Image (cartoon, rainbow, N blue to C red):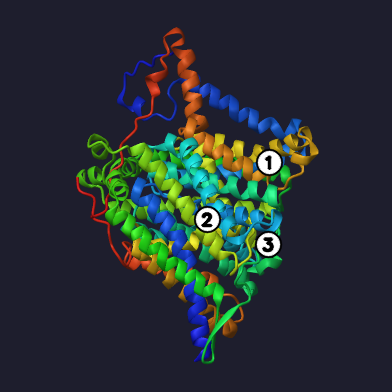
C-alpha cells in the first residue's frame, strides 16, 4: 500500500510536468490555431537558462527562476516575430513542420553551447521529504503539484475573465472577424507565444529536481505532453491537465507493474498505445471541443 | 516559351508534354546509365541511395503531396519492409517472393493505420502515425529473438536468378526499380484513382459531393504509400548490409518528410530533387566543416542544425520546394521580359477554428 501511494505521488508529479507542457501546447493552439511541436524543446531551453544562472553564475534560486522565466518569454516573442508571424495564413501542416524544424535547431544549439551531459541543479528543497505515516513524499514532487495547481487556476482565470484572454479566444475562433472588431491579432498571437514560452520555462524549472536536463529531454517529453493534450481533448485547458495526469500515472504504473515481469520496457510504449487507442476510440479526447466541419 | 498545339484529347494525359521534353528525359536516362562507367564506387553508391530515397519519397509524396494526409511515422513502414525482407531472406525465401511479401505486409499495415486516419485529420493523424512509429520502433528494439534488437540484423547479399550482384549491378537494379515505380505512380496519379486522391486533398467535402468514397480512397492512398515505402526499405536493407532499430527512428520519418517538402509537395520530380538534396547534404556539411574554423566545424550538432534551419527557410521562403523554384525559373526565362513576381504568389487564408465554444 505504501508503494502504491509512493507511485501515485510520483506519477502525479510527473503528470503535472506533462500537463504544464501540454497547457503550453493548448495555449498556443487556443490563441492562434497553430500546433507548436517545439514546446518540449522550449521547456528544455528554459531549464538550461536556469541551470546556467544557478550553477555558473551562482544566483539565488528564486531570482534565477524569475529571470529565466522572463528570458524565455522574450525568446517566445522573438520566435513569434521572426518565424511564426511569417507563417500566419499558411496551412497548419506547414506551421507544424516549421516548429519541428525549430525543435531540431534548438536541440542542436543547446547541445553546441552546453554539451550533451545531463545536468541538474540544487534547489532549496533537494533531498527533503515529508512523511505521512509510512508514506514518504519528496518535497520536489509536492512543489510540482502545488505549482501546477496554482498555474492552472491562473490560466483558467486569465482566459475566463481578462480582456486579453477573451481577445485570444476570439482571435482563435475567427482571425478575420477578431481583426474587424478591433482586436490587435498580431499582438495577441505574440503574447500567447510569450506566455506559452514562460509556462514552458516554469515546467522546465519544476522538472529539474525530478530529472536531469539534456538537449534531447524536450523531444520525448514533448511528445508525451502532446499525447496528454490529445487525450484530454486538444484545445481544452483542464483536459490538458487531466491528460497529463493520466499519462503520468499510466507510465509509472506500467513501469512498476509490468516492466519487471516481462523483462523489457513496456512503460515507454504504454503512452503511445494509450494515445493510439484514444485516437481511434475517441479522437476528440475526454473534454471534446471539436465539431464536424460545416460547409 | 513553347506552346503545344493540342489536336487530340489524349495530349492532356500524355506522359510527356512534347517531343522536346521526351528528349530531355531520354538524355537524363542515358546519362544516369553511363555514370558508373566514368565514376568511382563512392558516386555510384551515393546515387544508389538517391534512387532508394526517391522510391521511399514517392511513397510519402502520394500520401502527403497528393492525398493531403500527414504521416510523421513513415520510417515505421521503411523498417517493417526492411526487417520483413531480411527475415524472409534468412529463412531461405528467394528475393522475388520476399520483396512482394514485404510490400504486401507493409500495405496491409498501412490499411490498419488508415483505419485511424478515417476518423481524424491533420495534426491528429500526424500524431497517430507518430505513435504508431514509436510502437513499431520499440517492438523492433525489444523483440530481439526475431529482429536481433540493438545488436543488428545481417542482411543476405543481393542476388538475381542465382547471380550475386556487385555494387554496380545493384545500381542498375535500383535504377530500374525506381523507373518502374515512377511510371506506376505517375500513371496512378493521372488515372481516376489519383484524381480522387487530389480531390480529397483539395477538399474532402467537395470530393464526397462528387461521389468519391472517402474511406476507400484514404485507405488506398495509405496502402500504396506504405507498400512503396516498404519496397524502398527492402532495397535499403541490401544497401546497408546490417539493420539497426536506430536507423528507422523518428528522425528518419522527419527526414523523409523534409525530403518531400524540400523537393516540392505535389510534384513527382520534386521527389527526385529532394532525394538528391538529402543525400548531398551530409557531404555538403562535411565539406563545410573543413572550411569553418575548428571551434565551429567540430561541433557534433551541425548536421541536425542545418537540417532544421533549411526546413524552416524552405517553408518560409519557398513552400513549393526545389521543384516549385525550378518552375519559377523556367517561367522567368520562358516569358523573359514579361515575368511578374506576383504570378505565382501564394494565397493566404485566415484561420477559423473547428472548436465549439
x then y, percent, for residue A68: 56, 52
Q: Are marks 2 and 3 in contact (CB under 8 Å)?
A: no
> Pointer 3: what residue?
A118
> Pointer 2: what residue?
A201
Image quadrant assignment for residue A121:
bottom right
The residue lying toward the viewer, choosing from B183 and B128, is: B128
Residue drawn at (56%, 51%), measured in percent from left and top?
A67
x then y, percent, for residue B321: 50, 33
x then y, percent, for residue B244: 66, 61
Residue B335 visible: yes
> Pointer 1: what residue?
B282
Image quadrant assignment for residue A24:
bottom left
x then y, percent, for residue B303: 66, 44
Secondary structure, mark 1, is helix
Q: CA distance from mark 3 to mark 1?
A: 27 Å
Q: Quadrant of the N terminus of chain B?
A: top left
Q: Residue furthest top?
A: B337
Q: Quadrant of the C terminus of chain B?
A: bottom left
The residue lying toward the viewer, choosing from A176 and B197, is: A176
Q: CA distance from mark 2 to mark 3?
A: 18 Å
Amino acid at each position: 500500500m505504501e508503494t502504491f501511494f509512493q507511485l501515485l505521488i510520483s506519477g502525479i508529479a510527473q503528470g503535472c510536468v506533462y500537463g504544464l507542457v501540454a497547457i503550453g501546447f493548448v495555449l498556443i493552439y487556443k490563441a492562434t490555431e497553430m500546433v507548436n511541436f517545439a514546446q518540449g524543446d522550449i521547456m528544455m531551453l528554459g531549464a538550461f537558462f536556469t541551470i546556467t544562472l544557478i550553477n555558473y553564475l551562482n544566483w539565488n534560486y528564486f531570482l534565477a527562476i524569475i529571470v529565466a522565466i522572463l528570458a524565455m518569454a522574450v525568446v517566445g516573442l522573438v520566435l513569434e516575430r521572426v518565424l511564426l508571424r511569417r507563417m500566419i495564413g499558411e496551412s497548419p501542416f506547414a506551421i507544424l513542420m516549421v516548429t519541428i524544424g525549430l525543435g531540431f535547431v534548438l536541440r542542436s544549439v543547446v547541445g553546441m553551447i552546453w554539451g550533451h551531459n545531463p545536468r541538474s541543479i540544487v534547489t532549496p528543497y533537494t533531498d527533503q521529504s515529508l512523511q505521512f505515516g509510512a508514506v514518504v513524499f519528496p518535497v520536489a514532487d509536492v512543489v510540482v503539484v502545488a505549482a501546477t495547481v496554482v498555474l492552472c487556476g491562473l490560466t483558467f482565470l486569465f482566459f475566463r475573465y481578462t480582456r486579453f484572454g477573451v481577445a485570444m479566444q476570439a482571435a482563435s475562433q475567427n482571425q478575420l472577424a477578431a481583426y474587424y472588431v478591433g482586436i490587435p491579432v498580431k499582438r495577441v498571437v505574440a503574447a500567447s507565444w510569450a506566455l506559452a514560452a514562460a509556462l514552458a520555462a516554469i515546467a522546465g524549472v519544476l522538472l529539474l529536481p525530478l530529472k536531469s536536463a539534456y538537449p534531447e529531454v524536450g523531444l520525448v517529453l514533448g511528445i508525451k505532453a502532446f499525447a496528454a493534450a490529445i487525450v484530454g481533448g486538444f484545445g481544452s485547458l483542464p483536459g490538458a491537465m487531466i491528460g497529463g495526469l493520466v499519462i503520468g500515472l499510466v507510465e509509472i504504473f506500467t513501469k512498476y507493474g509490468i516492466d519487471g515481469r516481462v523483462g523489457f520496457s513496456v512503460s515507454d510504449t504504454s503512452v503511445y498505445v494509450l494515445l493510439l487507442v484514444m485516437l481511434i476510440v475517441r479522437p476528440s479526447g475526454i473534454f471534446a471541443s471539436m465539431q464536424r466541419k460545416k460547409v | 516559351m513553347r506552346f503545344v498545339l493540342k489536336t487530340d484529347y489524349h495530349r492532356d494525359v500524355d506522359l510527356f508534354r512534347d517531343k522536346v521534353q521526351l528528349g530531355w528525359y531520354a538524355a537524363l536516362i542515358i546519362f544516369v546509365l553511363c555514370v558508373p562507367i566514368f565514376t568511382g564506387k563512392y558516386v555510384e553508391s551515393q546515387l544508389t541511395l538517391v534512387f532508394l530515397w526517391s522510391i521511399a519519397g514517392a511513397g510519402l509524396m502520394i500520401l502527403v503531396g497528393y492525398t493531403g494526409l500527414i504521416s510523421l511515422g513513415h520510417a515505421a513502414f521503411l523498417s517493417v519492409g526492411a526487417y520483413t525482407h531480411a527475415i524472409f531472406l534468412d529463412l531461405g525465401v528467394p528475393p522475388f517472393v520476399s520483396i512482394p511479401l514485404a510490400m504486401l505486409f507493409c500495405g496491409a499495415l498501412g490499411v490498419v493505420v488508415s483505419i485511424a486516419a478515417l476518423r481524424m485529420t491533420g495534426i491528429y493523424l500526424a500524431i497517430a502515425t507518430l505513435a504508431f512509429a514509436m510502437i513499431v520502433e520499440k517492438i523492433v528494439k525489444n523483440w530481439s529473438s526475431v529482429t536481433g534488437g540493438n545488436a543488428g540484423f545481417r542482411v543476405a547479399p543481393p542476388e538475381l536468378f542465382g547471380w550475386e550482384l556487385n555494387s554496380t549491378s545493384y545500381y542498375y537494379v535500383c535504377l530500374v526499380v525506381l523507373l518502374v515505380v515512377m511510371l506506376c505512380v505517375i500513371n496512378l496519379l493521372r488515372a481516376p484513382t489519383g484524381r480522387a486522391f487530389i480531390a480529397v486533398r483539395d477538399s474532402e467535402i467537395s470530393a464526397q459531393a462528387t461521389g468519391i468514397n472517402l474511406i476507400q480512397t484514404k485507405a488506398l492512398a495509405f496502402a500504396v504509400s506504405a507498400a512503396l515505402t516498404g519496397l524502398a526499405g527492402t532495397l535499403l536493407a541490401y544497401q546497408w548490409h546490417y539493420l539497426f532499430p536506430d536507423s528507422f527512428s523518428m528522425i528518419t520519418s522527419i527526414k523523409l518528410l523534409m525530403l518531400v517538402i524540400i523537393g516540392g509537395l505535389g510534384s513527382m520530380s520534386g521527389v527526385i530533387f529532394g532525394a538528391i538534396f538529402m543525400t548531398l547534404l551530409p557531404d555538403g556539411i562535411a565539406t563545410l566543416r573543413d572550411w569553418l574554423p575548428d571551434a565551429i566545424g567540430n561541433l557534433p550538432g551541425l548536421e541536425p542544425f542545418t537540417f532544421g534551419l533549411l526546413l524552416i527557410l524552405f517553408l518560409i521562403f519557398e513552400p513549393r520546394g526545389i521543384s516549385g523554384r525550378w518552375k519559377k525559373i523556367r517561367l522567368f526565362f520562358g516569358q523573359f521580359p514579361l515575368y511578374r513576381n506576383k504570378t505565382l504568389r501564394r494565397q493566404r487564408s485566415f484561420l477559423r477554428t473547428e472548436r465549439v465554444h
